[in-house]
Amino acid sequence: MEMPAYLVKVISTLKQNGYQAFVVGGCVRDILMGNEPADYDVATSATVQEIRSLFRKTVPTGEKHGTVAVLIDGFTVEVSTFKSYELGESSTGLEQDLSLRDFTVNAMAVDENGSLYDPFGGKQDLLNKIIKSPRNEPEQRFMEDPLRMLRAIRFCSTFGFSMYPDTYQAITKHYALLQKVAPERIRGELNLILLSGLPALGIRLMLETGLLQQVLPEAVAGFAQRSIRHNKNVFEHTLAVVEGVPSRLKVRLAALLHDIGKPNTFSIDENGVDHFYGHHLEGQKMVENILRRLKYDNKTIGDVSVLVGEHMSRYPKVRNSSFKKLINRVGKHNLEDLFDLQKADIMGAAPPYDFSELDDIQAGINQILSERLPMSIKDLAVKGDDLIEIGFEPGPELGRVLDLLLEEVLEDPDKNERAILLGLAAKNTTPV
Ligand code: ATP
Ligand code: MG
């Protein structure tokens, strides 16, 4: 097994000082699968203090868990004291460390000569594409750290593996424990599931086992709904859209959540036809709450909720000013995601697929973007200060007048001249 020089240095430093040291965890799995590991983890008999004393540059990343980041030759290696059952108890070595890892495929180690230590059959499970707890004690493993349930699904959707039946059963029994896990950790695994090669498999496993109900109860509530315009229920449609958009986080999140407003907006008219009027706007509000609860950053929350809120914006009147308003509402940086979402939404519904309106809008928007026409208040030939100079008070009234001027300029870009706009503004002055 090829090991980078900096990793060999870390291991030999530990060994020369009388400690045991092994490369462990996901990187061993990755190498056996023929993939380049993202990073390397080392397990050692040295304590955190001893690790820190041996290397010049260290960062205490998780001292509680016995982990120190060693910075060496411009790389970072996570070095951890062997995991042990009792906190504080001196560890009993490699095998116990490996037995406390989440799954057999992540519970292998390699020494500096490249010899593999695999006490729980990880290599065989890797060949058979199986996610299984070491010693086949999944219930205990999941009770210790319920996030492992979501990690099991993440490894299935990332590598196309299946869960060992006992592992799967244990999740269907203990799914509710996920409530105890910090939202940031849940978010991390959800992101990896969404960005994996098989996101639909991951979301399907989450629904089947009960985990999705813990993470996104709002989504589960509407999944059984069926519309006559669809040949699938909302769940199957949603999965098709998630898999139909490219592997970028915001658009995958938007795909997962785009129809979340449907149950709250469902109605049937006198002809027995079902409608979900305003489900995109209801969805936009719900998405903000959901993503806030999962501790996403404000930029992600804003962009994903806009994508959900605008996913029905396919049929504006084909006029330049509508396109510009759409660009302003969505934001240039979200346009590609919006079009990808809309295309996948159409593909995920019943054929025949009609992309003509979408194509018109895309063409219109590309035209406008290429002409660099004025589109937002900052493009206006007058600024707030100019209006204050002619007698406007700073405040909401000023904002209202700027909005009115923008309306005029969106309709007719020729009006974007200082004299014309000041004239229009003056007409809008509230008489004293
Ligand atoms: P990735 O490819 O995403 O880095 P990974 O398997 O390396 O996946 P990490 O989160 O980097 O996952 O963790 C490194 C290793 O630490 C894992 O392979 C596993 O052995 C162990 N591990 C990580 N999280 C847990 C956990 N919650 N419970 C038990 N063992 C864990
Ligand atoms: Mg890793």
Image (cartoon, rainbow, N blue to C red):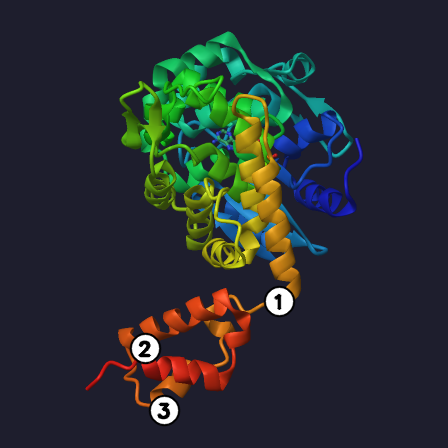
Estimate the x, y position of residue 151 in percent, counting from the top left: 50, 28
- Quarter of the C terminus within the rendering: bottom left
At numbered mark 1, what does the secondary structure look like: helix, strand or loop?
Answer: loop
- Which residue: 38% across, 22% down? 223
Horizontal relation, residue 181 to residue 250: left or right: left
- Which residue: 39% across, 23% down? 211
- Which residue: 43% across, 29% down? 147
Alpha carbon distance from label 1 to label 2: 26 Å
Q: Read off the residue under disc 1.
A: 372
Residue furthest to the top in view is 165
- Amino acid type, mark 1: Arg
Near mark 3 (Cα within 10 A), the count class, few <14, some 14-19 or many ≥20, is: few
Horizontal relation, residue 62 to residue 70: left or right: left
User: Do the residues bearing badges 3 and 2 touch, measured as CB atoms within 8 Å?
Assistant: no
- Amino acid type, mark 2: Leu
Q: How many marks?
A: 3
Q: Is residue 32 above or below residue 419?
A: above
Q: Read off the residue under disc 3.
A: 389
Q: Read off the residue under disc 2.
A: 398
Alpha carbon distance from label 1 to label 3: 28 Å
Alpha carbon distance from label 3 to label 2: 12 Å
